[in-house]
Amino acid sequence: MHADLVDWPSIAADDFPLPDDMPASQLVGELLAMLVSPDPEIRDDYAYTAASRWITGGHFDEILEALGDTAASRFTHPEVQARTFAPLILCSVLTRGHAVPGLIPEEAAERWYAGFSAWYPAEQDTRGWDDSLGWLHAVAHGADATAVFAKALPDRRTELLELCARRMTAAQVDYRYAQLEEARLARALTRILQAPGLKREQATGWLTVVAQALDGGGPGPLPIWAFNTFATLQSLHLHLARGLADEGVPPHAEAVAARTADLLRLPYYWLA
């Protein structure tokens, strides 16, 4: 099937009605091809918007696991836009699976998590926006996925907190957060911390990863990764104080905020 067989501008203009003249497998194949496109209109405005609506709407339930497998396989794709849109598709797939218990086998979610957890802290192209490619947002998209994985795989919650810590402290980066990546990470961390049954030491333990990364810092210019880390900790402190509009304040918010403030006193030694 070729892209010109689907009038995507018209579908977008009509608020993405599902085409009823083609099999779901054929439509998914078209969307998956478009999600690799370097053209942000094709990839983001058309393919991702359509896919997220139709997946969560239940239109692809019969092929949902295969769709998730294809998305997860793209974490090793040579094109950055293919890698950074993969977690968004997994978010939609896992969200649909959470809404319909039994739709996605746990082993499938574990399979996708393995690929995601290997990619997320290691991705080196962390630009939020590119003037040619549009939104890339590896950090933000991956953060969104961590929160969704926490619901699909609750036994992985502490690992997911540490995964976010490893992402924010990854040293091999040359991009300073400029598109609210720190806020997306803070929101994801807050969502994971909302999980029922999370013990206090589990809620705070992941900050040891951050403390170890910051240990030994001295005078001189602030490395980009450290700037990103402190920006994320600041945003997290705000999220913990205010809570999320749809979920409130996490059970151990006070303890996590106190540990976060301790780390923020490293650069902001004047804090009370």
Image (cartoon, rainbow, N blue to C red):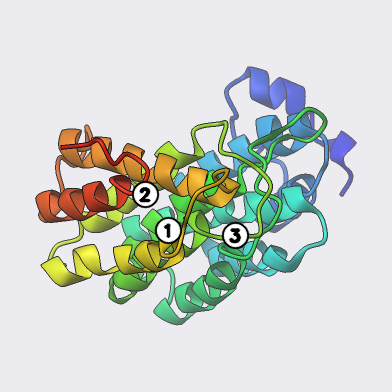
For mark 2, give the secondary structure: helix
Q: CA distance from mark 3 to mark 2?
A: 21 Å
Identify the residue at horizontal 41%, vertical 44% (top origin): 230
Q: Residues within 10 Å of mark 3 (few under 14, many from 20)?
A: some
Q: Are marks 1 and 2 in contact (CB under 8 Å)?
A: yes
The front one of 31 and 198 is 198
Question: Which residue was labeled with disc 3?
Answer: 171
Vertical placement of 126 versus 105: above or below?
above
How crowded pointer 1 is (Cα within 10 Å; few <14, some 14-19, many 20+) is rated as many
Q: Amino acid at mark 3?
A: Ala
Of the numbered discs in the image, which one, if any, rests on residue 188? 2
Q: Tell me how far mark 3 sits from mark 1, CA to CA.
A: 20 Å
Res 75 quadrant in image = bottom right
Q: Residues within 10 Å of mark 2 (few under 14, many from 20)?
A: many
Dot in front, 3 or 2: 3
Residue 263 locus on image (x, y percent): 30, 52
Residue 39, above or below 187: above
Q: Residue at x 65, y 17 (%)?
A: 13
The disc placed on residue 84 is: none
In this orientation, does residue 261 appear? yes
Judged from this view, the residue extending furthest toward the front is: 219
